[in-house]
Image (cartoon, rainbow, N blue to C red):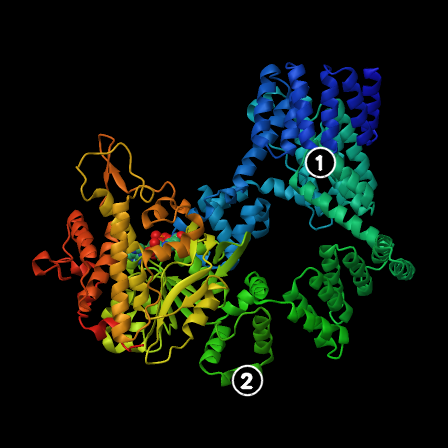
Amino acid sequence: MADELKNKGNSALSAGNIDEAISCYTEAIKLDPSNHVLFSNRSAAYCKAERYTEALADADECVKLAPNWTKGYTRKGAALEFLGRFDEAVGVYEDALQKEPNNAQLKAAMENAYSQAGNKAFFNPFADPKLMDRIQKSPKLRSYLSDPDFRLKLQMMQQDPSKLGQFIQDPRVMACVSELLGVNLDDAMNGAGGDAQDDKMETDAAASPPPPPKEEPKPSASADQSLTEEEKKANALKEQGNSAYKAKQFDQAIELYKQAMELAPTNVSLYTNTAAVRFEQQRYEDCIAECQKGIEIGRENNADFKLIAKALARIANANVKLGNLREAKRYFDKSLSEHRAPDVIKRAQEIERQLKQLEEQAYINPELAEEEKAKGNEQFSNGKFPDAIRHYSEAIRRNPDDPRLYSNRAACYTKLMEFNMALKDCDTCIKKDPKFIKGYLRKGACLMAMKENVKAAEAYRKALEIDENCQEAKEGYMQAELGTNDEQRRQAALNDPEVQDILSDPAMQMILGQMQKDPKAVAEHLQNPQVRTKLQKLIDAGIPITMSGVKVVICGGGNGAHVAAGLAALNGADVRMMSTFSDEAERISAALAANNGLLRVTYTDAGTTKELDAKLSVVTKDPAVAGKDVDLILLVVPAFAHAGYLRALLPNITPGTVICGMPGSPGFPFEVDGILGPELSAQVTLMDWATLPWACRLLEFGRHVEVLGTKESMRGSVRLGTVPSRVDPVPCLQSLLGQRPVLNASGHILGITLGSVNQIVHLAVMYGQWYNWDGKGLPESPLFYQGINEETGSLLNSMSAEICALAKKISDTQGVDLKSVLHIYDWYMDCYGKDISDKSTLATSMRTNASYRGLRHPTVVGEDGLHRPNYGYRYMTEDVPFGLVITKGIAEIFQLPTPNIDRVLAWSQKQMGKEFVRESAGGRVCGSDIGMTRAPQRYGLTTVEQVLGVPKQ
Ligand code: NAD
């Protein structure tokens, strides 16, 4: 029974009924699951059906059932080759050859797999994940990366190594292959010449002069010895035949091959060579007959399957010449089932495409299309949309150039809420006839349904360009505009490559810059239709024209700087990222260059994640490049690095420049004033923000940064300069950062310094834990917030009260607004109220703040495994010189005693081995390490006026 099914399967397979064959073998396997031949046959059938994974599984089973039966290995090798796993195939053939060392077919198969494996490795150097690094490191190749076109090619080849063939003409690609593989490519290419020539003969037979039949490899001396006298003579005659063929002496060639056949009747290549001659003579039927003979003889004599494949492909080519494309396709497929030669694969695909095209063309009939359309219209009016789609689709097949058909089908898809299909049809409709207004109207309606108001407005606007009186377009446009909120606009714009291109166009940047400075220039630029279209695009995209092109220097190259640069660029700014830190700027530039110049920002906000790609104008270490005509300097680095950037950019800071610390951190205004000097600092505008707007981290340096969360609002303060700034500081920054955090700027700029909580919290908790420490190591690091006792809480209370008293004194005496300076308890309730479970005292609030759970003291672990306090941690190294010393310095100028702050400062500087306040001078801020701080005294600011800054607010 199983045998019967097997035979039925075999017959079905020979007749090309692959599915039937597979089901026969499957039934047979159910009856006889230990029959290895059934698995072998089904594997062959799966291969023919191009179901290679299943073919491999069956071959595996076959080998398992009959480990000494080499055919199973052949099947397995073939399946692996089809799957492109040539290395593994080689291994399988090797195993088989151990069992049957003289099997010529196995040897040939192994050689083939081996050469394919080699080819694969040879031709796939671009699959190396470190490709960009390697190119970047190569002095010879590095410069190519500056060309976006080249980078695009690299990217395409990385994704699809077969693209190499397409780009190999580019000498730079060739140079990469040479260098990456460490081979002399010229040699390698020349070595492959013989095959290439032969391929040409098979596919371009009409070309003249005809290329010679494939030169069989010359038999080696030892091989020659194993040949019979007849075979040697036959080879000599074949050689002569090949020469005659090359000389276009076709009849002579035929005669010589014939004589050779008499001596070596089983030599398949004599038949395929004869066929090649017939092909050149345009005697295609004879060519086919000759190949058929060769195949028959080859099969009987276990000839190399590559020769059989070649004969089959030649039959296919002859059929192409005879116009029998279908037959040609059949033979190409047969050839491929023997051996997957790349040129035959390509040829088969091409013929398939031509066949499809011919079929489509033959089907065209505009009259029938009209009939189908009418039927579609009827079904549409009856509300039978799927039926209408069926008729419209048929009409499209009958007349694919009629735009109305796509538009009608789009209407059906919209009704069925298949918006993507509808959009596709609208786009095709518009492509077929860009003046056909319905295409835009349908597109607008569809986009409205998808809540893509920005894009819908654009579609309706295009409809209005065709007919300005079209009521449907007018109404659609208005509705789309009404329903569009700024955030939607911005988000749509962020991902729109057209917007990105406009913003990175230097000419447009100049125009936008000019328009910012001189609103009258707007009217002038709108005269130019091209500029007008681009400006309209920006306006539609919700990018405030007055903000676009703002020249922003982002100082820094860390997490925050990447986010700030990316968002500002996405929001239209001319972003220059500047890092003076080591070789950071170069590394960022290189990473960007390897990523098509795009910086990716993964932005999670309100539960939604967006991937945004930004284009920065430049990344540089050079302040002259970054600072040219700068409008806004955004410092996104830790406070200790501010001074370096300010000094570097000083020559580019002019009256009207905005300088912004984000975060500014305590003492920021003093540092700016100290570095700029009283005159210039009075003319610039300062913004000081209490923190960074985001929790963020770099995923890939220079290429990809992730925003994990964005603050709802951000507290800051602005000090306006005597010269108006070139951009309106807060709205400008807001539009560069996006809608969140809401920027909340209020009060005097000193409020941010005095209101900083880290300076008291970190230091009070450190002091509380360690001031009377006995010096013995602890088995584990104590909990930082959860571990504080009432005494520490009370100390913190008192320090905060001293700062509040200072703020009050300044406000009362100087009439400035320092309401942003909150007592620490109120601050906790504001920020963490809902996370705190016991609000009875400051200490209990901190201990029961869920957000602080588990945080521990910074410690160093000694060789004894015990923990001791780490006074080199930023809680000390930053919060003293860039925190508490500054507050102490201000209090000193305002002559307000601060005994609790003094106590903590004295202890802290002792642990740090520094002198910021001098005990011998009554605890004044004049210690020998004052130069490390941002205290006003360090910059020689010693009067109330100086501390308040100029001009007074
Ligand atoms: P980061 O550590 O990633 O950035 C440090 C960057 O500062 C460096 O990459 C470099 O560009 C620059 N820098 C450091 N030393 C320098 C030097 N000597 N010369 C020149 N440049 C130097 O920091 P970040 O995460 O971007 O944070 C920036 C500020 O924001 C920090 O003060 C941080 O405490 C604060 N902050 C960060 C986050 C966050 O989620 N990343 C959250 C809140 C606050």
- Say how many tags the image has: 2
Assess mark 1: CB under 8 A from ligand 1? no
Query: Closest to the observer: 636 or 462?
Result: 636
Looking at the picture, tell me which residue is in the foreground, 707 or 875. 875
Q: Is residue 801 left or right of residue 148?
A: left
Side of 160 where 253 appears, left or right: right
1 vs 2, front mark: 2
User: Up-down: is 536 above or below 777?
Assistant: below
The disc labelled 1 sits on which kind of residue? Leu
Distance between the alpha carbons at the discs numbered 1 and 2: 66 Å
Q: Position of residue 357 (x, y in %)?
A: 79, 52
* Viewport quadrant of the N terminus: top right
Question: Disc 1 on helix, strand or loop?
Answer: helix
- Label 2 sits on a secondary structure element that is helix
Q: Residue 423: where, in percent of width, then height?
A: 72, 59
Which residue lies at the image location 71% right of the left edge and 23% below the top edge?
302
Q: Identify residue for label 1.
A: 336
* In-front residue for pair 753/457: 753
Task: Report the residue marked by disc 2.
Answer: 523
* Mark 2 nearby-residue class (10 Å; few <14, some 14–19, many ≥20): few
Q: Residues within 10 Å of mark 1 (few under 14, many from 20)?
A: many
Report whether residue 183 is seen.
no
Query: Ligand 1 lies in which image quarter?
Result: bottom left
The quarter of the displayed image where residue 819 is located: bottom left
Q: Amino acid at mark 2?
A: Ala
Residue at x-position 58% and y-position 46%? 160
The image position of residue 624, as x and y in percent, is 33, 69
Question: Going by the image, does 925 lie left or right of 530?
Answer: left
- Earlier residue among tags 1 and 2: 1
Q: Nearer the viewer, residue 877 or 679?
A: 877
Which quarter of the figure is the C terminus placed in?
bottom left
